[in-house]
Every structure is written in structure tokens, then in C-alpha cells.
Image: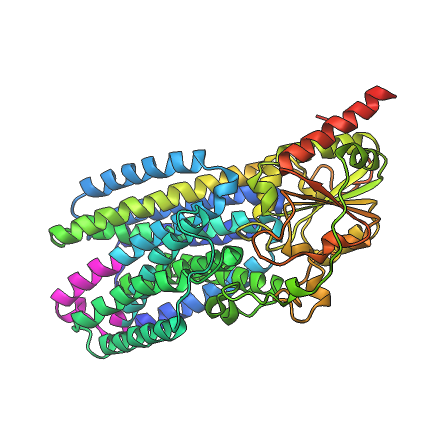
């Protein structure tokens, strides 16, 4: 590395270009109109990095590289083109797992090669630390992401899976893993320590994600994002490659910020989500509070009349709307109301959906202008307070007044939307009963709340039909 | 010494990441996540060297698998990010939202 030949200069230049393009690409995401172009440039950066790497003088045969690139491209392309926007969280989890497998395997290969070599090429203490951290974060991300994928895809239950002493077992595994990592750093040739770290990290990924409930998935996905980045950065340290370190640091920082934001939006500490197993023993106290009031319901005909004459409507969607694939009917309803002179906005909670920003993507897919999406809770509440009608579609926790009123509620303190401040609230809900969380939502029995029971898509469809019928009737 | 230098790069890049990513609006958080995911597929660079370096049969096999996985990550990550960003439409209407836009 002391004397750079022309070839090395070209390689380094390609890595530098890639790093700059990655940073510019992420920066473009701060300005939505420029985001697409910026990310296309980041993809070019990746191409530069790959071309630069192919010039590396350590590469002796190209056949496996080329076959691998083609196979990977052939798996990735149809995956990205076919995936539904509702399945985006699973997809991201899956993609994290793939990236992490690569980082882990590179770590294993590098360890095997370096522990067999001596001198300059051999294992230093620092290198052993980098490799140990690489397989630690890598392996953790691999199994953690597969577990998250399984939960989101409902291959395994979305409910937290817990057993007695689980946290103790996890802490013990973490302690042993770090001890092994320490031993590896002290004696880089200690292969047993290296593979202990690897094996324990695989187990930890499983046991840390299992007890986390489906509703907390936005935090888990962000956290795995961060770990995947750290694994990539550690790879960079191990093979002395700055573009890996930079890209890994960017992802590590990004995932970390997002998980903090998500925890904040749920008013829960990081540790509480990871070790708390939210919902494992849900505080049922709220359900016991004997409010015998029955929610009142409204027919689609009457609801349609109110909507047709409303001048301001706010729609609060939850993951239920996405599950019912109701976003397209939603837009139809929005267009009808707008044609009648009303204004429609969407209030999107940071944790609505199964990953950060999930519902924004789903509504945009339906062709809804992002100018209509309110993503700040306080802003949205100001608009809601002056609205004629608020429609809650498939959302529950994010509109639960207990978060403000009931100190014993597990939701207490979480920033929520306040639909009851509007003139009227329509809640579209599958059926009566408490639903998944087991806690009755007091919003449903408020004086200005009216229930529309049924499948979100069906109910919205009949609202659209009734509003159209109003026009024809006159 | 090389490793100290690398630590500088890591920490500075982390700061750049913090500063930029904090400013990404919640609207684009999902594309942000798939974007960083795609970018971290840069492990591909390490995988390529492992697969082509002729460090023995097992290393080549592991390297090959790593190339396949990283390439899947990169391809899928960038394509899905692009697909999502193409769906976000809006700047036309943003300043004046009071008047209904003619239906398209």
C-alpha cells in the first residue's frame, strides 16, 4: 500500500467516487423530488466500486465471481420487481439477512486465510478484533433478520415468544460471546474462540428477536439495519477497505437513528423493547375498567351524507388498511370528497405499519399525492382539531386516548393522534370485540365516535358507492 | 497505524450519516431503509476478493456464496428503492392544497 501503482490508484479512485455517490444519494433523500435521481447515482457508485474491485491484483480467477454476480442478479431482480408494497418489511428483513450472510462469510474466509499465513499477512490483534466483530454482528443479523422475516410473513407467530429466565440466558450468551471475543483478540490464533463468537451470535439473533412482538417490528427492523451496517464496516476494517467502512458507518448510523425515532414514537426506551417483551404479560387493568358503554354504529348511507358535505376530512390509516389492500379505494373516496369541495388529508403516525414510513409508501403506491400526507403528530393533531370528519381505518394503538388518560395503560405517554377533537369520528373496524392487543379502545365509546363494522376495503367501497348515489339522487 | 486511520474514517463517516439521515423526512423512511440496505451490500467488494483469490476450495465456495448473497442484496435493494421513489408524486400541489385538483 506504500507505493500506489496505476492499478491501485484506479481502484482507490473508484472507491472514493463510490463513497461520495453513496453520501450524495442518502442526502438526496432529504429532498423528495430529487431522491430518485440521487439513489440512481448511488447505484452507479456501487457499479464503480465493483469494477474497481475486479481490478484487484489478488484476484486470480474470475469465473466464480462472474457466475455469482449473474446468479445474485437473477435472484434479486425478480424479487424486487414482484414484491408487494405491503410486504416491504419482510423484504427488507430478507435483504438484510443476505447482506449479512455475505459479510459473515467474508469474515470466515478472511480468518481462515489469515490464520494460516504469517508475518505481514498474518493476524494482528486489531485484525482479530475486526474479524470477531464482523462475524458477531453479521451472524446476529443473519438469524435475527430471518426471525423477523418469519414473524412478518407469519410463518411464526407475531406474538412474543418468551420463557422464564430468557433475559438471563440472553445476557449469559452475550457475556460468553464477549469473553470469547476478548480471548480471540488476546490470542488471534485461537480458532475455537472465533467459532464460539460465530455460533453464539447465530443463537443470539434468534433469541433476541423471538420475544419481540409484531407491533414492535419497526424498531427491530431498524436495529437490524444498524447491525448489518456495523457488520459491513467491520468487514472494511478487516480487509482494509475504506468504502466498506464508510458505507457500513452510514447504514449503522441510519439504522440507529431510525430505531431511536421509533422508540420515541412509542414512548418506550430501547432496552424496554429489546428486553421488555411488550405484551408478553399485558397489563389488563385497562380492560377491566367497567365502562359498560357500547360503541354506536352508523350505516354507510348516513356516513356518506356526512362525508359528502364535509369540508375537511382526515383519514388515519393503520396497518389494517394495508392488510385489507384498501389504499386504492381510499384514493377513490378522497377524489370524490375533493370533487365535492372538501379537503382530505392523511395523518400517518411514525409507527403505523410494520416499518418506519411504511404507510407513506403504500398510499403513494395508490397514487396519493404526498402533499396530502401529514407525518408529524403535532401538525396532524392541529388539522384534526378543525376537521369535520376523521376516518380511522385499521388503526388502534395510535388513536387510543388511554395513552393520554390512563397511567396504568402500557401505551401511556405515547404521542398519539386525537381524533375525538374533530366534529365526528368514523372508525372502520373488522368487528366488535377487543382484537389483537386485548385492550378495549375507549375511543370507540366516545360521544362523537361512530363505528362502521366490516372489512376496510368493503366499507370504503360502499361509502364510495353511497356518495355517488347521492349525486344521482339529486 | 492503518487501523487507527480506519477508525477516523469510520467515525467521521458515522457523523456524516447522523447529520444527513436525521434530516430525512418520515415520508421517506422506508426508502431510506432500503437505500442504506442496498448500500451496505457493498460487502460484495469483500466477497469478490474472497471468491476470486484462490485461497483453497472451501474459501472459494464460501466466497462464491457470499458474492451471490451480496449481489442479491445490492440488486434487490437498489431496484426496490427506485421502484418506491418512483411512486412518490407531489411537488406540483404542495403550496396550495385548499383547491381540489381536477381528477386525472
The stretch of residues the image draws in magenta is A106-128
Q: Is residue A127 magenta?
A: yes
Q: Nearer the viewer, residue A453 or A187?
A: A453
Residue visible at 59% across and 44% down in the picture: A320
Q: Position of residue A319 (x, y in %)?
A: 58, 47
- Rendered residue at 63%/64% (across/down): A411
Q: Position of residue A430 (x, y in %)?
A: 62, 42
Question: Which corner quadrant of the image does residue A91 belong to?
Answer: top left
Q: Is residue A400 left or right of residue A197?
A: right
Q: Quadrant of the C terminus of chain A?
A: top right
Of residues A226 and A163, the one drawn nearer to the viewer in this rendering:
A163
Give A166 or A50, whichever is nearer the viewer. Answer: A166
Q: Colour mode? A: rainbow
Can residue A442 be seen in this snapshot?
Answer: yes
Residue A473's quadrant in the figure?
Answer: top right
What secondary structure prevails in the magenta region?
Answer: helix
Q: Position of residue A427 (x, y in %)?
A: 71, 45
**In the depicted structure, whether residue B49 falls above or below residue B97:** below
Q: Residue furthest right?
A: A474
Check if residue A335 falls in the magenta segment: no
Amino acid at each position: 500500500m506504500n507505493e500506489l501503482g496505476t492499478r491501485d490508484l484506479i481502484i482507490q479512485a473508484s472507491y472514493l467516487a463510490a463513497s461520495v455517490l453513496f453520501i450524495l444519494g442518502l442526502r438526496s433523500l432529504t429532498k423528495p423530488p430529487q431522491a430518485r435521481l440521487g439513489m440512481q447515482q448511488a447505484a452507479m457508485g456501487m457499479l464503480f466500486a465493483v469494477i474497481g474491485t475486479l481490478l484487484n491484483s489478488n484476484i486470480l480467477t474470475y469465473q466464480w465471481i462472474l457466475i455469482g454476480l449473474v446468479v445474485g442478479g437473477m435472484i434479486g431482480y425478480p424479487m424486487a420487481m414482484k414484491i408487494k408494497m405491503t410486504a416491504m418489511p419482510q423484504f427488507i428483513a430478507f435483504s438484510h439477512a443476505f447482506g449479512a450472510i455475505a459479510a459473515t462469510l467474508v469474515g470466515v474466509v478472511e480468518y481462515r486465510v489469515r490464520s494460516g499465513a504469517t508475518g505481514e499477512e498474518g493476524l494482528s490483534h486489531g485484525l482479530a478484533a475486526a474479524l470477531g466483530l464482523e462475524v458477531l454482528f453479521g451472524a446476529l443479523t443473519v438469524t435475527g433478520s430471518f426471525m423477523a422475516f418469519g414473524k412478518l410473513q407469519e410463518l411464526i407467530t407475531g406474538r412474543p415468544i418468551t420463557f422464564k429466565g430468557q433475559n438471563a440466558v440472553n445476557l449469559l450468551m452475550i457475556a460468553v460471546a464477549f469473553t470469547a471475543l476478548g480471548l480471540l483478540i488476546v490470542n488471534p490464533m485461537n480458532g475455537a474462540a472465533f467459532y464460539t463468537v460465530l455460533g453464539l451470535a447465530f443463537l443470539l439473533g434468534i433469541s433476541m428477536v423471538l420475544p419481540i412482538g409484531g407491533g414492535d417490528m419497526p424498531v427491530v427492523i431498524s436495529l437490524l439495519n444498524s447491525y448489518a451496517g456495523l457488520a459491513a464496516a467491520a468487514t472494511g476494517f478487516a480487509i482494509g477497505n475504506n468504502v466498506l467502512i464508510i458505507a457500513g458507518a452510514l447504514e449503522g448510523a441510519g439504522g440507529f437513528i431510525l430505531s431511536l425515532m421509533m422508540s420515541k414514537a412509542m414512548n418506550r426506551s430501547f432496552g424496554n423493547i429489546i428486553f421488555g417483551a411488550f405484551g408478553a404479560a399485558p397489563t389488563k387493568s385497562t380492560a377491566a375498567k367497567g365502562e359498560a358503554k357500547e360503541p354506536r354504529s352508523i350505516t354507510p348511507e348516513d356516513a356518506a351524507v356526512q362525508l359528502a358535505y364535509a369540508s375537511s376530512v382526515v383519514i388515519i390509516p393503520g396497518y389494517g388498511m394495508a392488510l385489507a389492500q384498501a389504499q386504492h379505494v381510499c384514493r377513490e373516496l378522497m377524489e370524490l370528497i375533493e370533487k365535492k369541495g372538501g379537503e382530505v388529508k392523511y395523518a400517518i403516525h411514525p409507527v403505523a405499519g410494520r416499518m418506519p414510513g411504511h404507510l407513506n409508501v403504500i398510499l403513494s403506491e395508490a397514487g396519493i399525492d404526498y402533499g396530502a400526507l401529514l407525518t408529524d403528530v403535532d401538525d396532524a393533531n392541529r388539522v384534526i382539531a378543525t376537521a369535520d370528519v376523521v376516518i380511522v381505518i385499521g388503526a388502534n394503538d395510535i388513536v387510543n386516548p388511554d395513552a393520554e388518560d390512563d397511567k396504568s395503560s402500557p401505551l401511556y405517554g405515547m404521542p398519539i393522534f386525537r381524533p375525538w377533537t374533530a366534529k365526528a369520528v368514523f372508525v372502520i373496524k373488522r368487528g366488535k370485540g377487543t382484537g389483537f392487543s386485548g385492550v378495549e379502545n375507549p375511543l370507540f365509546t366516545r360521544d362523537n365516535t361512530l363505528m362502521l363494522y366490516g372489512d376496510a376495503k368493503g366499507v370504503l367501497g360502499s361509502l364510495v358507492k353511497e356518495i355517488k348515489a347521492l349525486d344521482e339522487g339529486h | 497505524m492503518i487501523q487507527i486511520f480506519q477508525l477516523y474514517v469510520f467515525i467521521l463517516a458515522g457523523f456524516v450519516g447522523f447529520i444527513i439521515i436525521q434530516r430525512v423526512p418520515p415520508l421517506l423512511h422506508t426508502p431510506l431503509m432500503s437505500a442504506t440496505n442496498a448500500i451496505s451490500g457493498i460487502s460484495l467488494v469483500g466477497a469478490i476478493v474472497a471468491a476470486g483469490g484462490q485461497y483453497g476450495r472451501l474459501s472459494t465456495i464460501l466466497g462464491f456464496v457470499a458474492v451471490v448473497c451480496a449481489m442479491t442484496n445490492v440488486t434487490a435493494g437498489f431496484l426496490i428503492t427506485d421502484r418506491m421513489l418512483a411512486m412518490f408524486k407531489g411537488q406540483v400541489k404542495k403550496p396550495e392544497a385548499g383547491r381540489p385538483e381536477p381528477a386525472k
